[in-house]
Image (cartoon, helix red, strand yellow):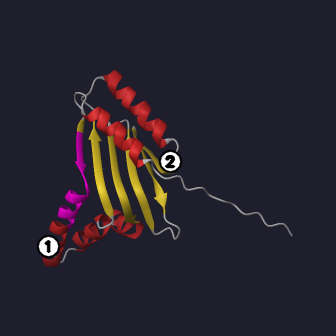
Amino acid sequence: MMIKILLVLMLAVPQEKLTSIINEYSRKGDFEVTRVGRLGTAALKGVIRMTASDDPDPEVRDALSIISGIRSVAVVEYENSDESVRREFERKVESVLDSSNLLMEVKDEGDNFKLYGVVGENSDTVRDFVMYSPDDCTLVCLFGTIPLDKISSIARR
């Protein structure tokens, strides 16, 4: 009897490389970059905790559990940038993300976006979640750990 073992290599999202590209293009015209680091996410978590303590809405409590493991956030919107700069940015981002785990690709009526990250060993969390949509000129990076059950419970609502 022969037993084959399948080894799946979980390729992490290269946070440093993505951050470097984001930093480079944040200085170029018409790239809107919003970053929230450790201090900002800690403050945001505190505000949500205070809100959640008085709010019976389960979505608020789910939001807190979703962001509790996030260390930093970066959102890039670049639809108003020059097309050549936009294409250059996309080539760099795609070359970095090509070495990462593609969790899902969604194509729906002209919209196309890709989700990247590393699913935990027990498939209950995703680490370093990236949503990339070149069609919408958007890159969203959530660095840290996010519980999958909370994301799916919000998506079902």
Is residue 78 something that shows in the picture?
no
The residues tagged by marks 1 and 2 sit, at their Cα atoms, a distance apart of: 36 Å
Q: Residue at x 40, y 32 (%)?
A: 90
Q: What amino acid is found at the position of numbered circle 2 in the picture?
A: Ser
- Marks 1/2 in contact by CB < 8 Å: the verdict is no
Q: Residue at x 25, y 54 (%)?
A: 37
Q: What amino acid is found at the position of numbered circle 1 in the picture?
A: Met
Q: Of 105 and 34, which appears nearest the observer?
A: 34
Q: Residue at x 43, y 66 (%)?
A: 125
Residue 3's place in the image compared with 85, above or below, is below
Task: Please name the residue that numbered disc 1 is placed on.
Answer: 50
Task: Please name the residue that numbered disc 2 is placed on.
Answer: 100
Locate residue 75: give its quadrant: top left
Q: Is residue 1 left or right of residue 50?
A: right
Q: Of 147 and 105, which appears nearest the observer?
A: 147
Q: Which residues are magenta?
A: 33-45
Give the crowd class for mark 2: few <14, some 14-19, many >=20 residues within 10 Å: some
Residue 46: % across, % down: 17, 68
Q: Is residue 31 left or right of residue 85?
A: left
Is residue 33 something that shows in the picture?
yes
User: Mark 2 falls on what kind of element?
Assistant: loop
